Image (spheres, rainbow, N blue to C red):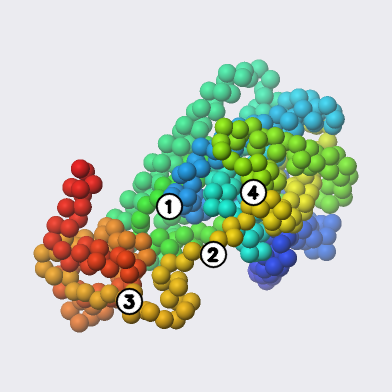
């Protein structure tokens, strides 16, 4: 069994490499691999457990959303915050309504179940889009990338709420619209507050606990992710929104081992994606998916060419965005794993529809990924939304690539008695971006500099510093009352 698991993971890793070079989204290959391993494929693995599939999907989404929040650069997303959130909320609602009307008129769904179908396929997977563009060497205009990143992470909670809300309407017909509205406000409000609170607690724990073993810091962040989701959910909030906000709070702050923890959670998110897509692929029976091919193609066409573009236009009407940017955002509404996970909820709830929702959603996702995912770079070039300016590099990147000029980036200094830095943790020094303490010598012994390491008088430091920051860094580490003076000026 372990050999099989290792082999499947290895195949998935190789598939991601093939995806990056070919322009085919990795999630499509993961899904195909899962189907190939299933009872109707070459693997012959008998698997039909919607409850387990749903549980795996929910846990995977928790860590994927947290990793997305942790990778969010607040400086980049702040200017596009409003338009991204409108896309993530109004956009999902408009998509759900248009697909609902189509399913009611054309596919024979009643209106409520049709809107449920639209809500399920309402969330996008821009992370897959960005990975495809990265693999093909395409750089988007500076404001497009943060819009796509923030929308893709923020629209999952909205799609989840709408889907579960429509399922509640279908299973409890006496539920009123006002009750759903109150539930929405409560879930989003508690979800945001829970995410903020647990983000602050995680930040406090990372910087103040001073764990004896570095390997325990990833364990601590995993614990905080699970706590953020579970406690917020138990309190009636959106746990998915909470874990994303927790990640954003940490991304905006400095904490110990930030780079290594971000890399750890990126790897964990990839593992969760592989696990989720393989499980979803196993849950699907190709013969049943093929039986809804006609309806699936029609639904995908309406989604890609009508619902998504209309939702983008309505969500961006009051912005100065160019039309070619709107068209591109409309085209990159790539569907991913979230719709397939959500499709297990009506399956478990026993909701009857003219066409099985799970099979229909799975086919729509396959069409969306195959059609949109393979044409992204072409559409980006045709619409002229590529960033053709020279790639910006920090001084350190330039020196590493050119192999020259390291001398002017190196700074050696000794911490004098009475310096404001004495008795402070490295994490609290607020050194300029690009500054790195490479070596610390204390009493003729080498000390490994970490975020929680305390600065002491007499410490000899070797740093890499951006040339324009040399004077500032030297003053912040060797001057008395430097940080106090800075705080006074900030206050004034």
Quadrant occupied by the C terminus: top left
Find disc 4 in the rendering and name its residue: 125
Q: Residue at x 13, y 70 (%)?
A: 416
**First of labels 2, 4 by sequence position:** 4
What percent of the width, then of the height, locates residue 329? 65, 45
**First of labels 2, 1 by sequence position:** 1
Near mark 3 (Cα within 10 A), the count class, few <14, some 14-19 or many ≥20, is few
Q: Which mark, residue 408? A: 3
Near mark 4 (Cα within 10 A), the count class, few <14, some 14-19 or many ≥20, is many
Q: Residue at x 61, y 19 (%)?
A: 177
**First of labels 4, 3 by sequence position:** 4
User: Mark 4 falls on what kind of element?
Assistant: loop
Left or right? Give the position of 28 relative to 270: right
Q: Nearer the viewer, mark 2 or mark 3?
A: 2
Q: Nearer the viewer, mark 4 or mark 3?
A: 3
**First of labels 3, 1 by sequence position:** 1
Q: Is residue 41 visible?
A: yes
Find disc 2 in the rendering and name its residue: 390
What percent of the width, then of the height, locates residue 184? 55, 28
């Amino acid at each position: 069994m372990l050999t099989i698991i290792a082999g499947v993971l290895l195949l998935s890793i190789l598939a991601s490499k093939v995806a990056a070079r070919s322009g085919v989204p990795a999630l499509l290959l993961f899904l195909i691999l899962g189907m190939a391993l299933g009872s109707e494929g070459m693997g012959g693995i008998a698997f039909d457990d919607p409850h387990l599939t749903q549980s795996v999907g929910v846990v995977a989404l928790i860590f994927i959303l947290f990793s997305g929040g942790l990778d969010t650069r607040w400086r980049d997303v702040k200017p596009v915050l409003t338009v991204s959130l409108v896309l993530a909320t109004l956009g999902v609602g408009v998509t759900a309504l248009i697909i609902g009307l189509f399913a009611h008129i054309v596919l024979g769904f009643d209106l409520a179940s049709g809107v449920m179908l639209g809500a399920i396929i309402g969330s996008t997977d821009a992370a897959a889009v960005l990975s495809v563009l990265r693999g093909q060497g395409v750089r988007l205009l500076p404001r497009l990338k943060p819009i796509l990143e923030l929308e893709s992470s923020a629209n999952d909670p909205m799609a989840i709420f709408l889907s579960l809300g429509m399922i509640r309407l279908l299973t409890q017909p006496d539920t009123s619209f006002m009750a759903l509205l109150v539930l929405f406000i409560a879930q989003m409000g508690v979800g945001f507050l829970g995410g903020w609170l647990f983000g602050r607690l995680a930040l406090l724990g990372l910087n103040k606990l001073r764990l004896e073993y570095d390997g325990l810091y990833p364990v601590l962040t995993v614990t905080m992710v699970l706590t953020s989701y579970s406690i917020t959910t138990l309190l009636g909030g959106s746990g998915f929104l909470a874990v994303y906000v927790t990640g954003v709070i940490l991304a905006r702050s400095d904490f110990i081992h930030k780079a290594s923890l971000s890399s750890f959670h990126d790897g964990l998110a990839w593992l969760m994606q592989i696990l989720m897509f393989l499980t979803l692929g196993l849950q699907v029976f190709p013969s049943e998916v093929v039986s809804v091919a006609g309806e699936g193609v029609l639904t995908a066409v309406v989604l890609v060419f009508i619902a998504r573009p209309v939702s983008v236009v309505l969500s961006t009407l009051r912005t100065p965005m160019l039309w070619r940017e709107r068209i591109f955002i409309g085209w990159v509404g790539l569907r991913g794993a979230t719709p397939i996970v959500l499709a297990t909820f009506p399956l478990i709830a026993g909701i009857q529809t003219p066409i099985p929702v799970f099979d229909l959603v799975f086919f729509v996702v396959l069409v969306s990924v195959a059609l949109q995912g393979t044409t992204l770079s072409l559409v980006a070039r045709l619409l002229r939304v590529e960033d053709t300016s020279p790639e910006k590099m920090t001084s350190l990147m330039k020196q590493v690539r050119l192999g020259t000029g390291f001398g002017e980036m190196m700074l050696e200094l000794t911490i004098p008695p009475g310096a404001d830095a004495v008795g402070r943790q490295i994490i609290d020094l607020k050194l300029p971006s690009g500054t790195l303490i490479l070596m610390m010598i204390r009493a003729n012994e080498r000390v490994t500099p970490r975020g929680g390491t305390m600065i002491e008088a007499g410490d000899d430091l070797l740093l890499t510093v951006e040339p324009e920051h040399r004077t500032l860094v030297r003053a912040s580490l060797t001057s008395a009352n430097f940080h106090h003076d800075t705080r006074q000026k900030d206050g004034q």
